[in-house]
Image: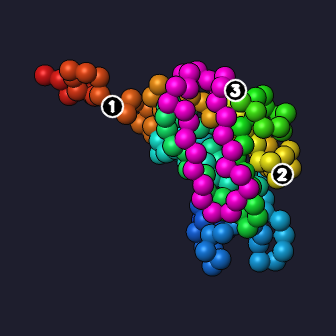
């Protein structure tokens, strides 16, 4: 039982980037084995962020909700080039626009940003992929969903309703 608990603690630290002496760069392990797929189910907008992370040949989160006009930051933590490139339909692996929205970070290592057009229609779903690795990615496609108010961790709107408290229990 004790070994199982320590195994879970170590697995959690590794998944969160802890316990690494390589600066968290991702890519390959010290013994030359390729990175493994992330575990668990990816969430939508952890911490309400507008960030896509590429690590271990996988996108996270797989569904990012952003408002029109939002700037999206892409962090490539792998030791190889990747891109975040829009496609008109998931799985086509060709650059394209969905409902007039397109983006392409180009191939890069490090950090890139792009901006969703301010006139992007709420309800638009824009699939994306990596132009360098196509379906070879652990998670070959991600999605950016254009929403009026992006999700945040508490599940409540990020701005209070006009004329009132954001928490109905705070009212007198």
Say which of marks 2 and 1 sits in front: 2
Q: Is residue 145 left or right of residue 30?
A: left
Say which of marks 3 and 1 sits in front: 3
According to the picture, the residue beneath numbered tag 1 turns out to be 159
The residue range painted magenta reads 99-125
Principal SS element in the magenta part?
loop
Mark 2 or 1, nearer chain start: 2
Residues under numbered marks 2 and 1 in contact, where contact means CB atoms less than 8 Å apart? no
- Residue 151 x/y as whole percent: 48, 33
| Residue 162 found in image quarter | top left
Identify the colour scheme used.
Answer: rainbow
Residue 101, compared with residue 134, is above or below; it is above
Residue 93, compared with residue 119, is above or below; it is below
According to the picture, the residue beneath numbered tag 2 turns out to be 133
Secondary structure of residue under mark 2? loop
Secondary structure of residue under mark 1? loop
- Residue 124 x/y as whole percent: 62, 23
Secondary structure of residue under mark 3? loop
Determine if the magenta segment contains residue 112. Answer: yes
Q: Label 3 vs label 1: CA separation?
A: 28 Å
């Amino acid at each position: 039982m004790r070994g199982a608990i320590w195994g879970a603690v170590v697995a959690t630290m590794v998944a969160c980037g802890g316990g690494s002496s390589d600066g968290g760069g991702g890519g390959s392990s010290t013994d030359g084995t390729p990175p493994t797929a992330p575990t668990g189910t990816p969430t939508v907008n952890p911490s309400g962020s507008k960030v896509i992370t590429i690590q271990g040949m996988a996108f996270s989160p797989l569904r990012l909700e952003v408002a029109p006009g939002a700037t999206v930051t892409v962090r490539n933590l792998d030791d190889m080039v990747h891109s975040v490139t829009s496609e008109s339909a998931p799985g086509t692996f060709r650059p394209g626009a969905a409902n007039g929205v397109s983006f392409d970070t180009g191939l890069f290592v490090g950090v890139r940003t792009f901006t969703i057009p301010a006139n992007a229609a709420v309800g638009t779903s824009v699939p994306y992929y990596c132009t360098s690795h196509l379906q070879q990615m652990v998670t070959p496609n991600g999605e950016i969903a254009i929403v009026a108010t992006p999700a945040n961790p508490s599940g409540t709107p990020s701005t209070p309703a006009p004329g009132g408290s954001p928490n109905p229990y705070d009212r007198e």
